[in-house]
Image (tube, rainbow, N blue to C red):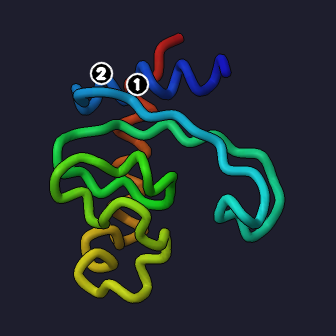
């Protein structure tokens, strides 16, 4: 939880989101394919497409799916195109967030 708080603070500094969504999926029936612990810390903006998570929480207009829709973006080519980025861009984003991590 300490790490999640630090990441949330870095995301607020980096992106000035309207809010931060935190959640943890555990088990096959929550969308997890390989059992392990991880914690999602997601900056939320109106219209953001925030990836795999509880579909009932994706209520911002244009979030990319309807309430109760499948988590799998594979059948939605437009959404899939919006959420895929290059490894170079991911490294840039990670570096930016990392530069804003509090001590």
Q: Quadrant of residue 14?
A: top left
In the rendered structure, are the residues bearing label 2 and label 1 in contact, judged by CB atoms less than 8 Å apart?
yes
Q: Residue furthest top?
A: 103
Q: Position of residue 27 (x, y in %)?
A: 78, 58
Q: Tell me what residue is drawn at x 70 percent, y 45 percent.
A: 38
**Can you say whether 20 is above or below 50 in the image?**
above
Q: Position of residue 15 (x, y in %)?
A: 24, 32
Mark identifier at residue 13: 2
Mark identifier at residue 10: 1
Instruction: Kindly state the secondary structure of the residue where label 1 is placed.
Output: helix
Q: Tell me what residue is drawn at x 25 percent, y 57 percent.
A: 63
**Can you say whether 70 is above or below 53 in the image?**
below
Q: Nearer the viewer, residue 97 or 29?
A: 29
Answer few, some or many: residues within 10 Å of disc 1's Cα (few below 14, many 20 plus, some between 14 and 19): some
**Placement of the N terminus among the 4 image quadrants:** top right
Q: Position of residue 32 (x, y in %)?
A: 70, 63
Q: Quadrant of residue 2?
A: top right
């Amino acid at each position: 939880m300490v790490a999640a708080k630090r990441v949330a603070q870095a995301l607020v500094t980096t992106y000035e989101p309207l809010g931060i969504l935190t959640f943890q999926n555990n088990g096959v029936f929550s969308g997890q394919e390989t059992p392990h612990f991880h914690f999602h810390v997601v900056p939320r903006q109106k219209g953001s497409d925030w990836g795999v998570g509880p579909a009932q929480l994706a209520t911002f207009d244009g979030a990319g799916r309807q309430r109760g829709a499948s988590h799998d973006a594979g059948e939605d080519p437009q959404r899939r195109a919006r959420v895929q980025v290059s490894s170079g861009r991911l490294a840039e984003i990670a570096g930016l967030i990392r530069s804003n991590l509090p001590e």
